[in-house]
Amino acid sequence: MDTAVDEDATLMLAYAQGDLGAFEALYARHRGTLYRFLLRACRQPAVADELFQETWSRVIAARERYQPQAKFTTWLLQIAHNLLVDSYRRKRPTLDGEAGELAIAQMEAPAQEQPEHALSDFEQRRRLQRAIEQLPDEQRTAVLLRLEQELSLEEIADVTGVGRETVKSRLRYAMNKLREQLAE
């Protein structure tokens, strides 16, 4: 374990014993990472805000049960991921039929508007972001955890609650889709 990992676990254990300063330190250290993950995963600021607050509420509620078996970041992202999955499940029934086709058409529109010329670094990053946004939920989550959070396959498996091979498969399919979209 590296020093930051040990420090996070120590801070969480101190918070469980009533040290509010320890929670403030954890919050300051991980709030940006958590919020970026949620916002990129769900693409809706209002939903990301709600999930962000609920994730920290769950951390607070679980403080006395916390056991440093995995990295704090992995545990935090696992809570956020589970809330995100619940959010997808609540939202999914409304996206069938014409509403689903409309949502898909709206997601595809920005990529089709890109000009076919040499792109600046900013434009290339924006195209990649758009391509990631168009991935299926499970693939998008795996890509964001890998690229932005720099988690290993095992850590992504822990966060998402699936096997390592499933994570590899999701990443492989996602990367193939991204390559196809970016080649257009």
Image: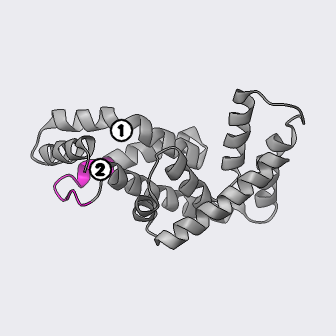
Seen from the viewer's position, the closer of residues 86 and 35 is 35
Residue corresponding to mark 1: 30
Up/down of 156 relative to 49, above or below: below
Estimate how packed mark 2 is, as few (under 14), some (14 to 19) or many (20 or more) residues with alpha carbons within 10 Å: many
Q: Are marks 2 and 1 in contact (CB under 8 Å)?
A: yes
Up/down of 159 relative to 36, above or below: below
Judged from this view, the residue extending furthest toward the right is: 116
- Residue at screen point 32% across, 34% down: 29
Q: Is residue 61 magenta?
A: yes
Marks counted in the figure total 2
Up/down of 126 relative to 82, above or below: above
SS assignment at label 1: helix
Would you say 10 lies left or right of 35 here?
left
Task: Characterize the magenta stretch by its predominant secondary structure.
Answer: loop
Q: Which callout, 2 or 1, points at the residue further toward the start of the chain?
A: 1
- Residue at screen point 40% across, 52% down: 77
Query: Residue 28, percent across and down?
Result: 31, 32
Residue 142: image quadrant is bottom right
- Residue at screen point 56% across, 64% down: 89
The dot on residue 72 is 2
Query: Residue 95, percent across and down?
Result: 71, 61
Q: Which residues are magenta?
A: 57-69
- Separation of residues labelled 2 and 1 (CA atoms): 10 Å
Residue 119: image quadrant is top right
- Residue at screen point 54% across, 40% down: 46
SS assignment at label 2: helix
Query: Residue 176, percent across and down?
Result: 72, 59
